[in-house]
Image (spheres, rainbow, N blue to C red):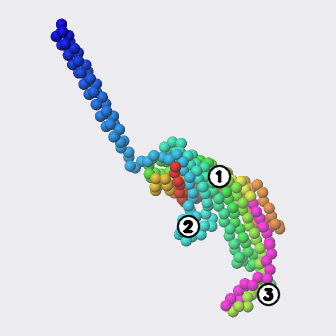
Amino acid sequence: MQFYGAYAVIALSKKHLFSLKQILTLLLLSIMAFTTNAQYVETVDPAKVLPAKNAFGVVINPVVAMMLGAGTGGLHYGLQYKRLIENNRRFRVASYFQTEKTNDHEGFPVMMSDTSLTFQTSTSGYQYAEVRLGMEWSDFTQKMDGIYGLDLIAGYDKSFEELRLSERITTQSPASNGIFQDEISNKLQSETTVKSLVIGVAPMFGYRFNIQEHLELIATLSPEIVYSMPISDGYSRNSPAFADNSGLIFRLRLLDLVLSYRF
């Protein structure tokens, strides 16, 4: 019985040892599988990127114009904020400001006397500010892709023109060849200011480039259809300088360059 008991004990021990070997084998295989899975890195298409949720952009047209040695008159300044909704769609809000002033100091003659000529000179310009709300579509997982969008526009426009009468006599300088240059009087003839509210829509088409991890450059073309509604106008004298500027207006922005920081 003791031998049997000893055999029984030995057999039992072998049975337990065999079970322990199974457990250790399964544990080792599990560790190896976990280690292999942890070392596995998913292959990512190098042409694709993870879209950033936010983007803050600046219109760089004036900067480019100055770098090229051109003037910035008539160019618009602008800021944009964009929020990713889906990988192919972003909401955006933008504000723009534009101003221009033109002076014609030479003018053209309107009256003549024995000793002088009277010229009509003009100063004109405008100031324009607007806010836009819209959507834009592109595959933002791609480093480069076409882009299109649609904006709603609400703006404010202030246009002005001033006409003056400049009386001049012939200069005594021989080099001037008798040109009427010496001004003896300058009188205001008329002054007009028109303020208007502007509403409209603007589709947008262009191309988008991710030039760095956080930098994005977008070049677009944007036709605009707006309706202008004058809300006030003021006149000096009895000679308004502007025709009625109310009604439907078609405008075209040939090139908008926007540099954005994505985060």
111 relative position to 212: left or right: right
Start-end of magenta stretch: 175-194
Q: Earlier in the sequence, mark 3 or mark 2?
A: 2
- Asked if residue 221 shows in the view, the reply is no
From the viewer's side, name the closer residue of 35 and 186: 35
- The residue labelled by disc 2 is 65
- The residue labelled by disc 3 is 115
Q: CA distance from mark 2 to mark 1?
A: 23 Å
From the viewer's side, name the closer residue of 2 and 120: 2
Q: Residue 131 got which mark?
A: 1
* Secondary structure under the numbered disc 3 in the rendered image: loop
Q: Identify the residue at horizontal 79%, vertical 82% (top origin).
A: 184
Q: Identify the residue at horizontal 63%, vertical 67% (top origin).
A: 73
| Label 3 with label 2: CB-CB less than 8 Å | no
* Secondary structure under the numbered disc 1 in the rendered image: strand
Callout 3 crowding tier (Cα within 10 Å): few <14, some 14–19, many ≥20? few
Looking at the picture, how far across and down is residue 161, in whole percent?
74, 67
Depicted 245 relative to depicted 187: above or below: above
Q: Quadrant of residue 18?
A: top left
Looking at the picture, how far across and down is residue 177, in whole percent?
68, 90
Q: Quadrant of residue 182?
A: bottom right
39 relative position to 126: left or right: left
* Secondary structure under the numbered disc 2 in the rendered image: helix
Q: CA distance from mark 3 to mark 2?
A: 45 Å
Looking at the picture, how far across and down is residue 254, in whole percent?
55, 60
- Asked if residue 9 shows in the view, the reply is yes
Q: Identify the residue at horizontal 53%, vertical 68% (top origin).
A: 67
